Amino acid sequence: MVDAARARKLADRIQQIVAEMLERRIKDPRLGFVTVTDTRITNDLRDATVYYTVYGSDGERAETAAALESAKGVIRSEVGRKTGVRHTPSITFVMDSLMENAAHIDDLLAQARAKDAEVARAAQGASPAGDANPYREPDSAEDEDDDLDDLDEDDEDEPGFDGHGAAGDGEDGRPGRPSS
């Protein structure tokens, strides 16, 4: 195993070399407008995966993939010469679906914005189905205290009141769970 920092540096260097080769040295007419987006290398430095995007139609993408496969040997030998590693990693080219994913996310966000706007238009003239505020609110803090005092006085008037609150008393009169 190799240090992760060294592997990342080598991957970055391979990305630079491949991008430079595609721009200057590979003169295949099938090669479209290629952008190298990322390079990843295994921990043992034996295999490198180069991710790329191509601007154009599906046919142009297929032609570019074929051109990259045919130029793989030349690119690998240049990578070996410029990096100076003992074993030159094998190179695999993978079409990066970054652009398609970004377009799909943009479409989903546009749909969400349209639905939000539709809900906002529907809610613009709407009114609540019941009261504007369905929750009871005391008129003032004094009213709330009076309500609590009234509850305590009502309990004292009941026959069999022993001074304990009703909450938590069991059926047998002891605090706790009801007896079964």
Image (cartoon, rainbow, N blue to C red):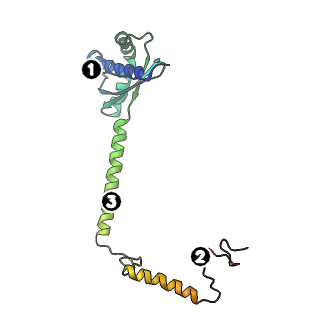
x, y (%) of residue 136? 41, 79
Q: Quick one: 152 or 3, which is closer to the camera?
A: 152
- The image shows residue 109, relative to residue 125, as above or below, that is above
Q: Determine the image quadrant of residue 144.
A: bottom left
* Residue linked to disc 1: 23
Question: Helix or strand or loop: what does disc 1 sit on?
Answer: helix
Q: Amino acid at mark 2?
A: Ala
Real-space Cα distance between discs 2 and 1?
Answer: 81 Å
x, y (%) of residue 16? 31, 20
Q: Residue at x 44, y 9 (%)?
A: 86
- The image shows residue 36, relative to residue 138, as above or below, that is above
Q: Residues within 10 Å of mark 1 (few under 14, many from 20)?
A: some
Q: Residue at x 32, y 18 (%)?
A: 17
Q: Earlier in the sequence, mark 3 or mark 2?
A: 3
- The image shows residue 47, relative to residue 144, as above or below, that is above
- The image shows residue 5, relative to residue 88, as above or below, that is below
Real-space Cα distance between discs 1 and 3?
Answer: 45 Å
Q: Earlier in the sequence, mark 1 or mark 3?
A: 1
Q: Determine the image quadrant of residue 161.
A: bottom right
Please identify the residue farthest to the left as the structure is shown.
24
Q: Nearer the viewer, mark 3 or mark 2?
A: 2
Question: Helix or strand or loop: what does disc 2 sit on?
Answer: loop
Question: Helix or strand or loop: what does disc 3 sit on?
Answer: helix
* Residue linked to disc 2: 167
Real-space Cα distance between discs 3 and 2?
Answer: 47 Å
Label at residue 116:
3
> In the picture provided, is 174 more to the left or to the right than 137?
right
